Amino acid sequence: MSRFLLYLGKFAHMVLGYLAASLAAGAFLNLVFLGAAGLMAADMPPEVATGSMVFTIPFTALFVAYFAFMPALVVMLLAELLGKRDWLFYALSGGFVALVFLGFAYQSGDQGFAYRDPLLPVSIIGSGLVGGIAYWFVTGRFAGALRPTSPAP
């Protein structure tokens, strides 16, 4: 029973890490597109910008979490099984998850979106990198901690 509770706690820790990664990636996308659209003007009061981000960052994170779930689940399980704990693995894995999402978007939607606006794919890959680092910060540093170890001779 105690092993079951350990695995349940690890699963909850992975969900918390995925939530943090989605929020970080959503915040990155939000800031990039607000800056690119010119909506972060210097004459805007900081209360207005902060108030809008309180709503838009979790809203963007909801879409990030929805679209990145399946490839991120594969990466999270692989990292847990291999016991990867370095930040570079998680950053590159986040970029890979973003590339998988872009591949699906390219196949199912408008194929020319990457050529008309190169900011879109680059910012999505950047948000994957940021999300991967956020996942490492919350959960990835403890990956593989539940693997059984052999007794010392």
Image (cartoon, grey):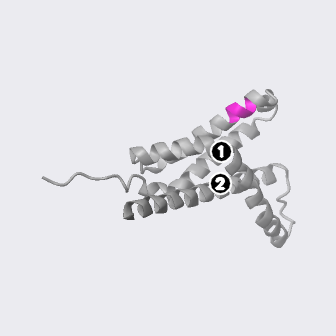
Q: In this figure, which residue is indicated by the disc labeled 1?
A: 68
Q: Main secondary structure of the magenta part?
A: helix
> SS class of the residue under badge 1?
helix
Residue 41, relative to residue 74: is it above or below?
Answer: below
Location of residue 46 (image quadrant):
bottom right
Asked if residue 138 shows in the view, the reply is no
Residue 59 seen from this side: yes
Q: Amino acid at mark 2?
A: Ser
Question: Disc 2 vs disc 1: Cβ atoms closer than 8 Å?
Answer: yes
Q: Quadrant of residue 31?
A: bottom right
Give the mark count: 2
In percent of the image, x 77 and y 58: which residue is there? Answer: 59
Residue 115 picture location, percent across and down: 78, 29
| Mark 1 Cα-neighbour bin, 10 Å: few <14, some 14–19, many ≥20 | some
Identify the residue position indicated by label 2 in the image: 22
The residue stretch that appears in magenta: 102-106
CA distance for labels 2 and 1: 9 Å
